[in-house]
Amino acid sequence: MEREHGQQLLSRADRIVVLTGAGISAESGVPTFRGEGGLWKSYRAEDLATPQAFAKDPRLVWEWYGWRRALVGACKPNEAHLAVARLASDRDGVSIITQNVDGLHADAAGQLSGSSAQRAMPLELHGSLFVTRCTVCDWQRADRDAIDASSIETLPHCQRCGALARPAVVWFGESLNPQVHERAFHAASEASVCLVIGTSGVVQPAASIAVATYQRGGAIIEVNPTETPLSPYAAVSIRGRASVIVTDLLNAPK
Ligand code: NAD
Ligand code: ZN
């Protein structure tokens, strides 16, 4: 039984990496890029989440981020985010690494108290919809404001140097922050289990984080309704929705 095998691997693991993608947030109402509701005004994410798209038409890209910020800002963490946050607060050696930019892992951590909340804070590989940064200097700020994309002047601007600001997310074709990248690979290459939840496994280098655990002899446990390029590496693949499967796996008697 895949589920029991997964529970066994998790209970014996000394270090665990939980790697999540858009699928963990689907049941919170955040559309995945490759599923239904992934299009906006018939644009694909790959057409908008790029430095080229922003250089060509910053109003269009900001309008899309304004729409996503409003949509995601109204969403709440689901049972899977909460179970993962509890795992990280209850046990030593758990790192949560996410490709998501929706802030829902941090929101789930925020529901725990004090030092538990700190332990459950995720490493956000691709940044956050709710942080804005300057396109020129290193200014950035937390930002949940609505976006007025009616003109270039009304878009967010740097409060230090006045240049145009942009969402502090990693776009297609951009590199990850080197420190974030290093911390993620370090954790994965020491983990005995990488629990991969709701990622299509096609966006690099995030997908290779799980492979780093596999290569050091650790086990991949995959939770996804469909097969992915990571499935052949997985010791355990459980097909189903994150909110059901993850709670089942993590709330098992110790
Ligand atoms: P993806 O959209 O490419 O794939 C989502 C995966 O989730 C698929 O494999 C799908 O089968 C699975 N899935 C769908 N519903 C699920 C459920 N209920 N439970 C478990 N799994 C489910 O997402 P990705 O692999 O994360 O990569 C896309 C890129 O887009 C990432 O870089 C990410 O930053 C970004 N993105 C983020 C968000 C977000 O922040 N929530 C949303 C869309 C895209
Ligand atoms: Zn600036």
Image (cartoon, grey):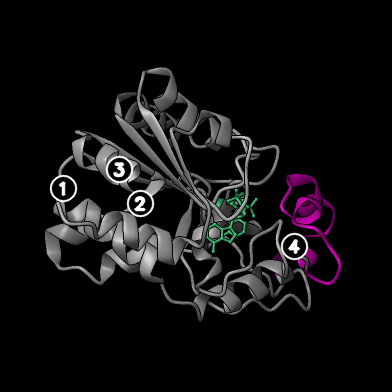
Where 163 sits versus 92, above or below?
below
For the residue pair 51 and 115, the one nearer the viewer reads as 115
Write down the residue under mark 2.
Answer: 122
The reply to whether residue 72 is in sight is yes
* Mark sitting on residue 61: 4
The residue depicted at 38 percent of the width and 58 percent of the height is: 246
Where 68 sits versus 199, above or below?
below
Left or right, residue 221 beside residue 206? left
The crowd level at tag 1 (other Cα within 10 Å; few <14, some 14-19, many 20+) is few
Write down the residue under mark 1.
Answer: 91
Write down the residue under mark 3.
Answer: 95
Separation of residues labelled 2 and 3 (CA atoms)? 7 Å
Earlier-in-chain disc, 4 versus 2? 4
Where 72 sits versus 214, above or below?
below
The residue depicted at 62 percent of the width and 41 percent of the height is: 228
Separation of residues labelled 4 and 2 (CA atoms)? 26 Å
Separation of residues labelled 1 and 3 (CA atoms)? 10 Å
Q: Which residues are magenta?
A: 40-62
The reply to whether residue 119 is in sight is no
